[in-house]
Amino acid sequence: MRDYDPTFVEEKWRRKWEEQRLHVVDMIHAEHPFFNLMMFPYPSAEGLHVGNVFAFVGSDIHARFKKLNGYDVFEPIGFDAFGMHAENYAIKVGKHPKKLVAENIANFRENQLKRIGVMYDWTHEVISTDPGYYKWCQWIFLQLYKGGLAERKKAPVNWCNSCKTVLADEQVENGLCERCKGEVIKKETTQWFFLITRYADHLLKNLDIIDWSDSTKKIQRQWIGKSEGAEIQFQIEGAPGSIDVFTTRADTIFGATFLLISPGHPLARNTSDSHKREVEEYIDRAMRSAAVKEEEAQREKTGVFTGRYAVNPVNGERIPIWVSDYVLMGYGTGAIMGVPGHDERDFDFAKTYGLPIIEVISPDGGSHELSQAYTGEGVLINSGRFDGMTTSKGTKAIVEYLVAGGAGKASVNYRLRDWCISRQRYWGPPIPIVYCDACGIVPVPEEELPVVLPETDDYLPDGTEQSPLARIDSFVNTNCPACGGAARRETDVSDNFLDSAWYFLRYPSAHYDEGPFEKFLTEKWLPVDMYIGGNEHAVLHLMYTRFITMALHDLGHLPFEEPFKRFRAHGLIIKDGAKMSKSKGNVVIPNQYIDQYGADTLRMYLMFLGPYKEGGDFRDTGIAGIRKFLERVWHFVMSSVTREGEPSRDMLHWLHKTIMRVTNDIELLDYNTAIALYMEMFNAMKKRDHVHADIIEKFLIILAPFAPHFCEELWEYMGNSESIFTQRWPGYDPDVASEKVVEFVVQINGKVRDKFPLPVDTPEGEAKKVALESEKVKKRLHGEQVIKYIFVPNKLLNIVVR
RNA sequence: GCCGGGGUGGCGGAAUUGGUAGACGCAGCGGACUUAAAAUCCGCUGGUGCUCAGCACCGUGCGGGUUCGAUUCCCGCCCUCGGCACCA
């Protein structure tokens, strides 16, 4: 009998699969297309770590399961190779990113991905740095530009001092750069934006109908941050015009004792002469200060009086107008009414500057001394004709009153900001725009795409707010596509997240060069049937990709508006208390485990570590246990299979029970419990001298998604010539799968006192009779008075005494 | 601070329309095989106590509650992970 040699087995089947093109789908004729997608990796220098393998294998198991269920599964892969992660590393090691990326991709593909038993269709590989790919990133930019969804505008943006570029809001975490963890400050500059805010409501509404992990949807909802309220006009006293404020608490308007405007507000410099200097100074200081960081969020409120007053539209009260930097220009109208009695921030501000505090919402209808802001609900007081109304009723009534008087309107605001896509870096697709003195902003004509990223060794960012491309005259200087005169190219490249916002659209059409995606293939294979990835991309990639898909739909390029029918977030692999990642320096490379135990063992071990959707701590104690399990199965198949007679009823029961449960678990991605079920069934088989081949073969089929090479080998050993993945997932008979005997429990006052086997569906009278004959029960019941019996069919009888 | 997820043996984790807590595995202990060891196989394995082939009590973060019965439901806390964080 030969021993299990994973290296031999895995190499053999990898070769066979490639020769037979088992993982290449007929994209045109497939009858049951199923697009099984995994987030494509960034090819780092360190290579894939076991956290990545955990994610990829979980997706691959699902794909293989679907294939066995009769689907034509398309499981592509590619590389997200542009962007600052690649470039920053290239700079660090002093190697050109182009060279580095090519090396890393080769390592990922040949030494790692091809060894973990994933059924990728390598004929549809997509690499984002390929001009044949990023050409279409530029095309998408042009479509959005033409559709009015890309705009060059001046705005306060996030600037990473270390990466020397601007960043999108989504790429700033706690005031730090998502990539390098360096400090991010606010800068007022002109950049290209994608107007994702136009889709805020649409993105939010569709969350109700898409089949995604709840956790992901919650994060997106919160990020979009819809808040419903009103815009209210306050006239400026003694001057024309008014200041609009946004509030969700119109019910508190009688408590407004001041008006605050952001330093960036157009009216911030509208001051009385005597206050001009002070206000100017304050604004200058505020504009120069760093972006709000965590520890600064709670900082002292500061502000300056403009010398001017506004008039409260509900009662004609004259209230001072102040400028303060805690009012954000980017949210609402950039101005608020200060209601210190019922807003904590306004309360702090009022305390600092000695402004009056009026209670207008009372929890009980009475009046109180306010030692802090009361932000809860209550009854309106000190609010004229609105007194006595509840918070919600008062809000409605006051807004109606203001609307009728032409001083307000209902309004909705979103937390979501437009997506800044300009990057002052080298390693990305150049933004396809030309600036002409005569014609202004001119898009590069589609037939001139791609605007090729020029080769240069001079690619270091210099912090001038200009991309390194600005230093390459031959790139910058061009002719205006409109008038033919001398013109200059846009030198910024686009955000890496634009590359990844549509890559899945390219997979089916990887070889198509008439457009980004071919119509027939797109309609046949998209949207993606199952997408699996990490939740860390909930507001980055997963938000951007929904936006791009919606925009392309509305611009007439796609027949659907949501990219992924289902999305499931996998858990994270933790090591030494932190997420496994290159930046944390705690990566574990899978290759050593593949060498020592084999890919099938590693696959199963990672899936057995903990729930796929939750992840868990990586440690390698126990990986040998999985290897032993496979070896036991191996030896059992080699020694104990019989083709004589019929499968035993007992084994059929085990098989059907296992198929039933495992099918359910895999559909839910509960891989850890599925593996436990295989082990249980095998433990039952192992107790026999022989098990019928029909049982073993089906066992191998259902195990195959987890240990594909291993199951192929044994399948072949049993005399089958076709790949096990050409088989069909076995069905089960619920009657055969169901238990015939249950362990019945007798409780007294809820405590287990005895248990014994009973045929399933034993009626209450029968069960009670058996229970009362039990010596243990008799002993307990001696001298007690039984009050009642509680019978739960097939479970228990609880005898309640005294 | 606000919003979510979670807290179960020595360890990873099972089990929740309220019904046998600890499946499966790791580690550990005992035994078989062996000159011996490794490997393999078999058995035991939540804690405490006792008159120890057995029996009793305790036990799912903490404190209460509802119930015949609570890991599961309710109230009040603690810890932890993730999201947001001057968003009006």
Image (tube, coloured by chain):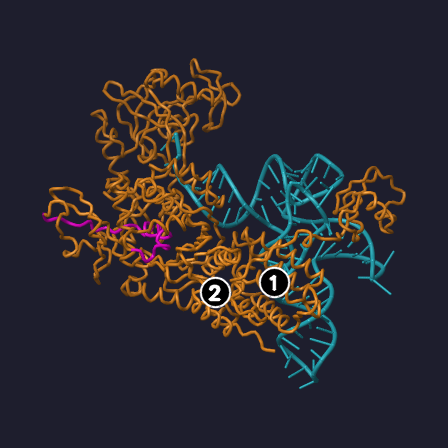
Disc 2 residue type? Gly
Colour cyan maps to chain: B
Asked if residue A704 can be seen in this view, the reply is yes
Question: In what quadrant of the picture does the C terminus of chain A appear?
Answer: top right
Q: Is residue A700 left or right of residue B68?
A: left
Colour orange maps to chain: A
Q: Chain of mark 2?
A: A
Q: Chain of mark 1?
A: A
Q: Which residues are magenta?
A: A485-512
Disc 1 residue type? Phe
Residue A117 is labelled as 2
Residue A711 percent location from the top left of the image: 55, 66
In the image, is residue A497 part of the stretch drawn in magenta? yes
Q: Which residue is mark 1?
A: A699
**Of all residues shown, which one is farthest toward the left?**
A485
Q: Is residue A486 left or right of residue A517?
A: left
Give SS at disc 1. Answer: helix
The residue at the point 36 percent across, 34 percent down is A301
Q: Is residue A531 above or below residue A279?
A: below
In the image, is residue A294 part of the stretch drawn in magenta? no
Question: In what quadrant of the picture does the N terminus of chain A appear?
Answer: bottom right
Report which quarter residue A203 is drawn in. top left
User: Can marks 1 and 2 be said to lie on one chain?
Assistant: yes
